[in-house]
Image (spheres, rainbow, N blue to C red):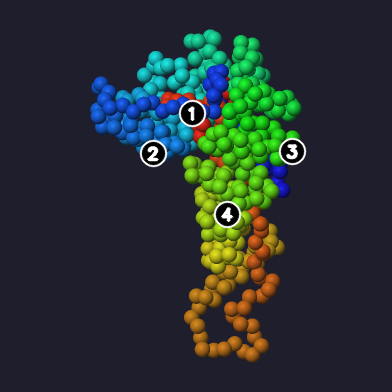
Amino acid sequence: MKRARIGAFLAAAALAACGGGPATKTSEAPPPPPRIEKVAGIPDAAVKAFNVGIAGLEQSPPDYTAAAKGFEAATVAYVGYDAAWLNLAFAYGKLGRSADAVKAYRKVIEKGNVPRAVQLDFGRALLVSGEVENAITEFESVLRANPDDLGARNNLAAAYQTKGDTQTALKYVKEVLAVQPKNVPAIVNLGLIYMKQKELPLAVLMFKKAIAFDEKNPHAHNNLGLAYYTLDDIPGAVEEFEKAISLDATMDEARLNVASIYLDYLDYAAALPQFQAVRARFPKSYVATIGEANALYGTAQYEQAAKAYEDSLETRGDNTEALLRVGKIYEEQLNQPKKALAFYIKYRDVAKVGPNDPINSTIQFLEQADTLQKQPSTEEKPAEGAPSADAAPAADAAPAAEAPSSGAPEAPVSAPPTGAPEVPASEPTSGAPAPATTAAP
């Protein structure tokens, strides 16, 4: 098993985080705003489209794609529709479109005089989209205007953790806990700091403390799972990840974490639906795509596996393992040697294999077979005792197919955040789904 690779992925999933101020129900998404019939100064077409977006949010589970389309139409019908832009930013965040969420926020932010909550949401979107310094600037702006704002301090703690400045993150966490010892986001942030410092027993203590104050906090459960995994308590880790998912079906980081463990232990059937649930929301997620491909291969769904491997190669075309795997699927399971040959050649070139590598013999054999197939048939029969033109020497046979890699796929181009309280229709966060991650403001 490739525990090192999986462990690296799991740990990474916990770091990009932020959240809101003290809360007792950070796991529950805010209710969507009520539908409206008329708004003074706003065209009816924009209001109608806005209500379509709200209907998407009201579905169970929410249909963020439909919601985004509705809010997009509302902003097209009336470009000055601030509520539509904020809800659009929220939907984009849930769809993993963090850069688009930032752009939507800016349509409102650039007007100035925005509420504190919107400014914090915007900062979280910046943080998840990778604009860490800009996020810090935004949170500091809130704190300057509101020196007692604990939410801004929690978000700053999360941002500085992402930046790798543990000491500054700890300073903000302590400032929050000095005022509110039961502030769950701050306790979660403290647990993450302990994890980074390899103080795992203390991290477990903090996450359990957070759960004691808010048992329905999916981010605390996800991070407790990470701590258990690092301590090699696999059953405990799986239990916590599954608990996080049960509390928040959009907790994609928890899905990826538990699916990675299932892959590690060759339970492909259990891993598959978790990867597919993430890909349904984030089709371009590299981790979810390569994970789904491995799980499909392990469950003998070869055509779908080949397609998923090819999808993953659109993001990481230099993944030699995927190139070799899809080549073998086309050659050995799907009987499409021409397609196999193309992937084998790409594998050879990317991997820069030596002259004695078995792949060279496989490529040579498939090229010869393809050439023979193209030659017109003749009436002549081969001389007695001569080998048939179609016969391939045993030495040229392609290597046997390997079992899918058990380890978790390497980190994707953009992994979903870990979690933090969600924000209302103003804006969830970015990337994967939830606004912040495990850390909390």
| Amino acid under disc 4 | Leu
Q: Residue at x 63, y 41 (%)?
A: 258
Please tell me which of labels 4 and 2 falls first in the chain.
2
Q: Marks 3 and 4, Cα distance to the nearest angstrom?
A: 27 Å
The residue beneath circle 1 is: 29
Quick check: marks 3 and 2 in contact, CB under 8 Å? no
Q: Residue at x 57, y 52 (%)?
A: 293
Q: Quadrant of the C terminus?
A: top right
The residue beneath circle 3 is: 232
The 10 Å Cα crowd at callout 3, few under 14, some 14 to 19, many 20 or more, is few
Residue 200 or 109: which is nearer the viewer?
200
| Amino acid under disc 2 | Ala
Q: Position of residue 121 (x, y in %)?
A: 47, 23
The residue beneath circle 4 is: 296
Q: Position of residue 49 (x, y in %)?
A: 31, 33
Element at badge 4? helix
